[in-house]
Image (tube, rainbow, N blue to C red):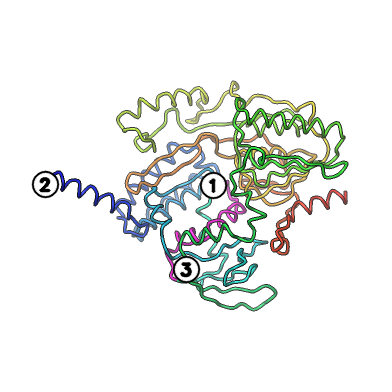
Amino acid sequence: MKIKRLIIFFLVLLQISGFGQSIDDSFSQKKMKKDLAVFKEIRQKVNSGLYKYRTKEQIDSTYNWAEEKINSLSTYRDFFNLIAKLTDYEGSLHNETNMPHKRWQKVRKEENGYFPLPVKCIQDKWIINYADGPIPLGTELVEINDTPIAELVAKLDMYYTTDGNNLSGKKLGVSTHFARYYRLAFGLQDSFRIRLKRKGQKASEEVVLKSVSYAKYYERFNQRHSRPFDQINYAKLDDDQKYSFKRIDSVSGLLSIHSFGMGNESTKEHKAYAKFLDSIFTSIQSNQLKNLIVDVRYNGGGDDPNDLITYSYLSQREFQENKQAWIAFKKIPLIRYYNINIPKFIRPLVVGKYNRKLQEIFPLEKNGKYFQDSNSKDHTIRYPSDKAFNGKVYLLIGPAVASAGSLFAAMLAGNENTTVIGEESAGGYYGHNGHTSMEYKLPESKLVTQFSIVNLTQDVAERPNQIDARGIIPDIEVEQSYQDFLSNQDTQLNFTLDLIRKE
């Protein structure tokens, strides 16, 4: 009986100690080196996007740097930051590395140490985005704890992944999670010495603010000044909020598509969306509209074929979902590290059906890569609808546009009758890694790394202003102005309406 009680005592003690793990606890370099080797092997054997935007020499050099860097690291947070940097460097918005749940529980309960106010990037300046705090709304941040704001943001943006060399999407991520990212990069802070410029003043001044809890920062973020304007970036949209159409005047209309998350061909939501598109473009055709604004600024992706059927109403050409798609393996490698709640010894039996499915989808082997063939649904030739709009299209894009949203926007941007307005998308123009997501868990740190395994080349046209390894580049770059930020006005939409009137 005593032995049984002793065992129970130690089990409870173990649970308590596990639950109390801090990300600032020490973590041995031996464990770091083991997990880094596993992480590298996973990327090399599983991730088809490893060399999409970086050369083999660049990747090898980065891992050499990481192996050397470990010699100066000592904490769990140090190692997480190292793996986060490697995750981001590859350049895929579907890449993500997270700490185990218990670690994050501990972080979310921290009572102090966090930057106290929401911020937002407006025309390359980071400003206070909170009306009821000790620093006035719209005040520009110059330095925090002796680090210039541009240098600071460059250290924080690795936590928010984007395609290729895109930076605009990273600004959106940093604006959202500024306090959390600061904590991850620099640790908990008792206070923040801030150099700032007040509105209308040229000289800077210094103030010191006490830190707040994790919960208090996000409470204030949810009360941010810009919430009425930008909440759509964060809201869980109901079916009737994902898309809409309205007439602007006798010759112009506005089609807003905030998500393609409507399921596939079999779902009621997809069928309702297909019916909506047919009805809207029937009306556009019968009313002979000449101008159509297509607003996808908040579209972070969703399901096929919603993006493709939408494009069929806006295209004058034959098209397919992608020109090429491939994965890096025939059978899922390293399944002992695969993040699935199945004992390791029976995993080969369970993953067998997934291997067979992947082999059906990617049957062609070329130089160690496995490609889709002409039978793939992704390579089905699609045709414009007989109701396809052939007037002038004004495509509104922004930093939140990603995945299926950026695939659609890239195809539309390549049309000769389209003018692209706004800010660069987070999703790539010529291609991306997407479709099938996989997760692996590192054995010592229990960090979970996630990435999409299908390397896609999109069916898009060459554009004279398009930069390789970047998101969709606007024909006319328009950001929200400072004054419109203060009044929560839509600079980009108003600019487009004025442009249509002038033309």
Q: Is 170 included in the stretch rendered in magenta?
A: yes
Question: Camera-side residue: 291 or 48?
Answer: 291
Look at mark 3 in the image and give the residue it sits on: 211
Q: Which mark is residue 91?
A: 1
Tag 1 or tag 3, which sits nearer the N-term? 1
- In the rendered structure, which amino acid carries the disc numbered 3? Ser
Name the residue: 55% across, 36% down: 455
Left/right placement of residue 350 relative to residue 462 reads left
Q: Is residue 201 above or below residue 226?
A: below
The N terminus, quarter of image: top left
- In the rendered structure, which amino acid carries the disc numbered 2? Lys
> How far is disc 2 from disc 3 in space, using C-alphas?
47 Å
Given the current orientation, which residue lies at the most extreme top position? 375
> How far is disc 2 from disc 1 in space, using C-alphas?
56 Å
Look at mark 2 in the image and give the residue it sits on: 2
Name the residue: 43% across, 44% down: 449
Tag 1 or tag 2, which sits nearer the N-term? 2
Given the current orientation, which residue lies at the most extreme left position? 2
**Figure quadrant of residue 141:** bottom right
Name the residue: 50% across, 65% down: 115
Q: Position of residue 406 (x, y in %)?
A: 64, 41
